[in-house]
Amino acid sequence: MEKIEWKPGTMIYPLPAVMVSCGSNPEEYNIITIAWTGTVCTDPPMCYISVRPERHSYEIIKRNKEFVINLTTAKLARATDWCGVRSGRDYDKFKETGLNPSESKKIKAPSIQESPVNIECKVKDIIEVGIHHMFLAEVVSVSADSRYYNNKTNAFELSRAGLISYQHGKYYRTGERIGKFGFSVRKKKKKKRKKPKSNKN
């Protein structure tokens, strides 16, 4: 298989396309769309977002030391994109998109009511890694839409929400399941052999 060499760049795709909400009061509430985000630790639960200092949300997050990562869906795709190409300096993004800010459980920053999962974060460190600064944060609360909880199986079926991802400048709906964690080493169940029918006359 022939490979083409490109210059070093950000090619770890797909990535989640999330809307990050921030602000300590309604006058400064804002939403920024981010793809540079992810998990960094399980215990304590830690994640990060990377933001350019010139972005309007940067100073809001730096000052308040908190934000909410809101997962996005196909229904939220247009709002997700709009919040990524428009600045909170010029627009009230909640008003313009019709999204509703809801009170978070543990922090002052608002959650986005329409998002299926709201991840509340408190900033622990800011790391200057280049043109982006990484906000390293601890997850202090998670709120999930009850519509995707299956009471019969006691499982949260987030796949039914129609989550979207970001790949090289484009948005995609997440696809079908092809396996689950550990499926490659799981032992196959032995099929029970059927007993032959007797030919007694």
Image (cartoon, rainbow, N blue to C red):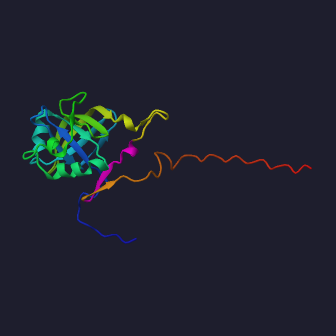
**Left or right: 19, with 154 as reference point:** left
Q: Residue 122: percent from the left, percent from the top?
A: 21, 33
- Quarter holding residue 124: top left
The outermost residue toward the top is 106
- The residue drawn where x is 10% and y is 35% is 63
**Left or right: 173, with 99 as reference point:** right
Q: Residue 178: percent from the left, percent from the top?
A: 46, 52
Between residue 54 and residue 73, name the one nearer to us: 73
Total residue callouts: 0
Asked if 28 appears above or below 162 in the picture, the reply is above
The outermost residue toward the left is 90
**Left or right: 9, with 28 as reference point:** right
Q: Residue 133: percent from the left, percent from the top?
A: 16, 46
Q: Is residue 62 visible?
A: yes
Q: Which residues are magenta?
A: 158-168
Residue 164 forms part of the magenta stretch = yes
- The residue drawn where x is 42% and y is 41% is 157
The outermost residue toward the right is 201
Between residue 176 and residue 82, name the one nearer to us: 82
Q: Residue 198: percent from the left, percent from the top?
A: 85, 49
- The residue drawn where x is 45% and y is 51% is 177
- Quarter holding residue 118: top left
Location of the N terminus by quadrant is bottom left
Residue 176 forms part of the magenta stretch = no
Q: Is residue 13 visible?
A: no
